Amino acid sequence: MSSQSGESRSDPACAFQTLLERALLLDLEVSHTGKILKVGAVLGPRLLARSGKNPLKEVCGELERLAAGAGCILGHNLIRHDLRILHDQAPGLSLLQLPVIDTLVLSPICFPENPYHRLVKDYKLVRESLNDPVADARQAAALFQDEFQALDGLRHTQPRLFEV
């Protein structure tokens, strides 16, 4: 086991994959009034896709069961949006205690030439088509892979800055 953890520290791809395997990928689609319209979550091979037609208590129970094996939550605009909504509407969720990786927060650090890094939604060929929260959660993981590589590069090229 110690050789695996040693490998993951020296191999960024392995470290990323190890982190991703335990990350709950999460995205909410919310109305302008704050009503949860859709929930999408992925943990490894398991996924959850629910519409707002399902009772919130039921969806939160399913989300909690899925998150039981997670080491962190990963998504785009989690801190200012999705987790605030969940906290307001379901404050007792234990997954709200997990560490958070927000790709929107990391983007200006990783890509200072593009400080507001929008989530690229390749599945949406037509701008008016509906959002897919499971696809968005997976897109956030793809963006995080780019950010992870950028941070690893920064660690090598500017180690003192990376220490911060």
Image (cartoon, rainbow, N blue to C red):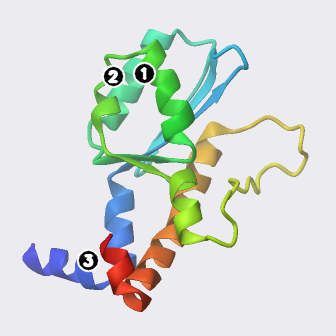
The type of residue carrying mark 2 is: Leu
Q: Position of residue 37 (x, y in %)?
A: 66, 21
- The circle drawn on residue 22 is none
Residue visible at 47% across and 31% down?
Answer: 83
Distance CA(mark 1)–CA(mark 3): 33 Å
Q: Position of residue 62 (x, y in %)?
A: 40, 24
> Which image quadrant is residue 161 in?
bottom left
Vertical comparison of 36 with 153: above or below: above
Cβ–Cβ under 8 Å for marks 2 and 1: yes
Front label number (2 vs 1): 1
Label 1 neighbour load within 10 Å: few <14, some 14-19, many 20+: few
Viewer-side residue, 150 vs 141: 150
Point out the image quarter for the C terminus: bottom left
Q: What residue did someone put label 2 on? A: 93
Vertical comparison of 73 with 160: above or below: above
Q: What residue did someone put label 1 on? A: 87
The type of residue carrying mark 3 is: Ser
Residue 40 visible here:
no
Distance CA(mark 2)–CA(mark 1): 8 Å
Point out the image quarter for the N terminus: bottom left
Disc 2 or 1, which lies upstream in sequence?
1
The type of residue carrying mark 1 is: His
Q: Position of residue 138 (x, y in %)?
A: 57, 52
Label 3 neighbour load within 10 Å: few <14, some 14-19, many 20+: some
Q: Secondary structure at mark 1?
A: helix
